[in-house]
Image (tube, grey):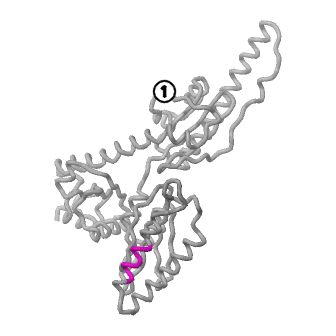
Amino acid sequence: MSQATLRQLADLEPDSVPMLSVYLDLRFDLGTPVRPGLTVLKDRLRDIEKTLWPRGEAYDEFTADVAVLDAYLESEVPESAQGLVMFISAHRNLAISFSPETPVENHIAFDALPHLFYLARLVEDRVTAVVALLDSETARLFVASDGDVTEVEDEHTDAAGFRALYHGREGIKHYERHVSQHRQDFAREIADAITQLAQREAAQNIYLIGQDEPVALVRVELEPLIAERFPGRSPRLSIQANSSAVRTLVEPLLEQIESEREKTQADLLIDAIRAHGLGVAGTDQTRQALERGQVETLIITEDSMLSDVERDAFTRMAITTDARIEIIPHHDGLRQFGGVGALLRYRSDR
């Protein structure tokens, strides 16, 4: 989901007619054709419907919204879908859907405004990496992000230029120089492709996987800024490995980086509060900073003391003021402030 769409949802004004927010886990039960999330959806919609009697404008809107949802589930959701996020308002002529690559926690609400906290958790900045799988003649490029690994380039091959025959000592030396130059040219080509892909995907990390020699050659050719992102010695993997094997290798590294980044953000916030710097924490101070447009990064722990209404309100204000949102599992320091705080763009001592 684009930031523009997220902003469109956050900018909606409360209406007398509610709208439907749906977060649905569409994974199949192991070994069966059953999606338990659909049962959760059915039960939840039945419960909401019971609250809308006697029939009136809200009931009619709910019925119309559910019809749109049913039609979408019937015709638009592929078998491979892991989850669905959808916001529907027949009254507003609005139907926005989003299919995340990772599982979704079930949450269905019929309310005056869209529920955006769960969406922010799905679309917040994630660690992205470019992965290059290399051997002496082939390179395959992947993008790894948010639990998914996708091959994004055709294979780069360099089999040509190694078949010529050379005789005698001088011929062998010439052949060796030819091979060495050819491999350096190939490494330079791959490094350029990696750099362009990393810039396009805003990748924070790059991993080279494969044989030692091509990995070393490509590493030398990469720009210094890119080269600093290597975690260390390259792991080994067959050039024929599928995306699943690449994901198994890379995913733990990305999870560790994400966890460290989240902790760093929360630690920076606590340090800023101690230094009377660009940081506030607690429900009231964070709300005031959001209302003034001071917030650079809103940080909420998953075990915060905020109510669902407060979480959505804070999320909406952060989106409409172009603040980043970090949702982290737990932080001991932030827990003392109710699990919510913000790094600020500027201070206001009013």
Residue 286 vs residue 128, the one in the foreground:
128
Q: Is residue 44 magenta?
A: yes
Q: Which residue is mark 1?
A: 233
The x, y position of residue 119, in whole percent, is 41, 63
Residue at (40% x, 91% y) in the render: 57
In the rendered image, residue 59, in percent from the top left (x then y), is placed at: 41, 88
Q: Which residues are magenta?
A: 42-49
Given the current orientation, which residue lies at the most extreme top position? 169
The image shows residue 89 at horizontal and vertical percentages of 46, 80
- Above or below residue 138? Residue 315 is below
Position of residue 133 measured from the top left corner of the image (x, y, whole percent): 60, 35
The reply to whether residue 131 is in sight is yes
Residue 15 sits above or below residue 78 on the image: below
Secondary element at image label 1: loop
Residue at x-position 38% and y-position 40%: 256
Q: Residue at x 39, y 86 (%)?
A: 17
Q: What secondary structure predominates along the stretch shown in magenta?
A: helix
Q: In screen coordinates, is 315 left or right of 227?
A: left
For this view, does 254 lie left or right of residue 259? right
Q: Residue at x 61, y 27 (%)?
A: 214
Residue 215 included in the magenta stretch of the image: no
